[in-house]
Image: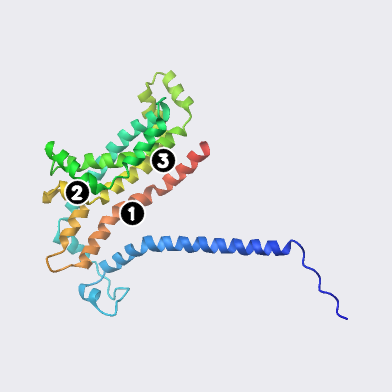
Amino acid sequence: MNAPAPAAAPGNAPLSTGAEAGLRARALTWLAAGIVVLNGFFPAVWILLTSLKTETELVSKPITWWPDAPSLANYAQAFTHQPLLKYLGNSALVALGSTVVSLFVAALAAYAIARLNLRRRQLILTCIVASSMFPLVTLLVPIFETMRQLGLLNTYTALILPYTVLNLPVCTLVLVGFFQSIPRDLENAAMIDGCTRLGALWRVVVPLAAPGVFTAGILAFVNAWDEFLLALSLNSNAAMRTVPVGITLYQGEFTFPWPIISAALIVAIVPVAVLIALFQERVVGGLTQGGLKG
């Protein structure tokens, strides 16, 4: 007579089931992360590969993923077909100008919301969030008419001012969170030593909230650098075009030099990519420190 099989330990089944559930959850997490990475990087990689191909290779069939003989000739033509360097300078000037003004005004607004005893503070924050949700196309005509009445069309100011207004909600919301995490005792000590409230803001609060300032600044700079609709509508002067508008001029009436356009796009992406790469570690590290302090 066969002996009965030993009974399984009561805890084995739940443990194996829990381990399998954990593996499934981890696999789904990695799958979702892979999809996000692929969705974000594939277009940039495809543009980079296109910029290294010739026109003939680009239209050949079947499609070739990798260039047979990579060449930088398209990058040289990108700077000679259009004044790309001038466009880059214009974009840098407008983006930096709007970023500086946005951070200055947003710091004042965020400090008032975070520190002063304002009535209906939550309503103010709600209005700030709501103001950032208007589609830009609905604001184009009022902004254009305002700039025309002020005589600012075809100037850098015509772009800096609207970009500042558009960036203020995001910058303010980011800085409010950081300012609230800073102890009030530090400001009180500075004011006891003779600082005014504004002096305490610029000398104590803003330096301690440096990660938030960098985060808001990067968001403002990228938004201004990539903006197309206002840059196209408010500046018709060829010498003041920004990169997004200038790249559209590479195409002819019947021709689309995609390799040259791709090279110009890569050149336009590089400053933003370098900016994010330089400050990413500092911003992420600062966010972690701020969370620990709070």
Q: What amino acid does circle 3 point to? A: Pro
> Which of 14 and 64 lies nearest the eye of the viewer?
14
Which quadrant holds the N terminus? bottom right
Judging by the rendered image, the residue that carries numbered circle 1 is 273
Q: Quadrant of residue 58?
A: bottom left
In the rendered view, does 181 fall on the left or right side of 159?
right
Please name which of the two marks, 1 or 2, marks the residue nearer to the observer.
Answer: 2
Judging by the rendered image, the residue that carries numbered circle 2 is 231
Q: What amino acid does circle 1 point to? A: Ala
Dot 3 surroundings within 10 Å: few (below 14), some, or many (20 or more)?
A: many
Compared to residue 202, the image places residue 61 above or below, namely below
In the rendered view, does 7 fall on the left or right side of 133?
right
Give percent across and percent down for residue 284: 44, 46
- Residue shown at the point (28%, 48%) measured from the top left: 135
Instruction: For mark 3, give the secondary structure.
Output: helix
Q: What amino acid does circle 2 point to? A: Ala
Instruction: For mark 2, give the secondary structure.
Output: helix
Earlier sequence position, callout 3 versus callout 1: 3
Give percent across and percent down for residue 36: 42, 60
Dot 2 surroundings within 10 Å: few (below 14), some, or many (20 or more)?
A: many
Kindly tell me whether residue 9 is visible in this rendering: yes
Earlier sequence position, callout 2 versus callout 3: 3
Instruction: For mark 1, give the secondary structure.
Output: helix
Tell me whether the residue at label 2 lies in contact with that at label 3, contact meaning CB atoms closer than 8 angstroms: no
User: Residue 211 got which mark?
Assistant: 3
User: Residue 8 got which mark?
Assistant: none
- Residue shown at the point (18%, 40%) measured from the top left: 157
> Which of 271 and 184 lies nearest the eye of the viewer?
184
In the rendered view, does 49 fall on the left or right side of 73?
right
The residue sitting at the right extreme is 1
- Residue shown at the point (34%, 32%) measured from the top left: 109
- Residue shown at the point (44%, 25%) measured from the top left: 187
